[in-house]
Image (cartoon, rainbow, N blue to C red):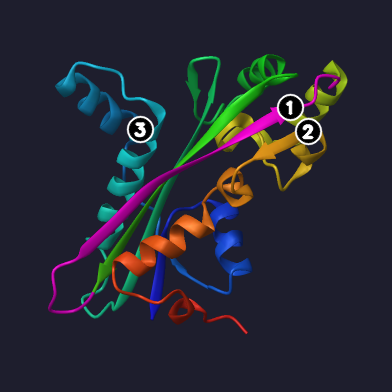
Amino acid sequence: MRVCLASTSPARLALLRQAGIEPETLAPAVDEDAVVAEVEAAEGRRLPAPEHVLLLARRKAADVAGRLDPDFDGVVIGGDSMFALGGEIYGKPYTAEAAIERWNRMRGTTGVLHSGLSVIRVQPGSLPSEAFAHSEASVTFAADITDDEISAYVATGEPLHVAGAFTVDGLAGAFIDEVDGDPSTVVGMSLSALRRLVAQVGVGWIELWNRS
């Protein structure tokens, strides 16, 4: 059973590998900001975080599924993550200035990491079938993180290209007091949700195990 990860996220790739799955990878050609802006304009509202991450996860998976070789027989996995704090929704900070500002807000607070997942079953000669789900986990940050620690962490570059400007399984782990929910959701993709979605498209989880 082939597995294609529609993502360039090192964290999602590492999660699948830890779960016994060595996927193929293909970067989705999706303009995330444009997709969200188009849907919000059409519906006349701002998408809440669960709908936001599901929309992008589904678009990414669909884009990659449509570009696979004709003999692909397996599943495509798409994902997206966002961090909500104090009524605001945050994606990747991209710049050091934005990451520092974000960490100043997060220090001593609790936010929610939202994750969207889409699984598409692709078989030669058959129409694709999809299952998708949203998962979330709350994250509480230490109140005694110093300005020097924030500056040093941001200088490593780790938080610049991840949702919420932190990675619980990386250098930021020491700055996190508590995670309430599936820890893999905070890393980038809920493995328990993924297992259920795979089953919904007619594939057994253990069929995906291809790592020794």
Upstream in sequence: badge 2 or badge 1: 1
The residue where tag 2 is placed is 177
Residue in the foreground of this view, choosing between 179 and 63: 179
Asked whether residue 158 appears in the rendered view, the answer is: no
The three-letter amino acid code for the residue at tag 2 is Asp
Reply above or below: 210 against 84. below
**151 horizontally vs 14: left or right:** right
Q: Secondary structure at mark 3?
A: helix
Name the mark on residue 52: 3
In x, y percent, where is residue 103?
69, 21
Residue in the foreground of this view, choosing between 125 and 184: 184
Residue contact between numbered discs 2 and 1, judged by CB atoms under 8 Å: yes
The three-letter amino acid code for the residue at tag 3 is His
The residue where tag 1 is placed is 141
Q: Quadrant of residue 178?
A: top right
Mark 2 surroundings within 10 Å by alpha-carbon count, few (fewer than 14), some (14 through 19), many (20 or more): few
Mark 1 surroundings within 10 Å by alpha-carbon count, few (fewer than 14), some (14 through 19), many (20 or more): many
Upstream in sequence: badge 3 or badge 1: 3
Q: Which residues are magenta?
A: 123-145
Q: Secondary structure at mark 2?
A: strand
The three-letter amino acid code for the residue at tag 1 is Phe
Residue in the picture at 60% in, 26% down = 111
- Does the magenta-highlighted stretch encompass residue 140? yes
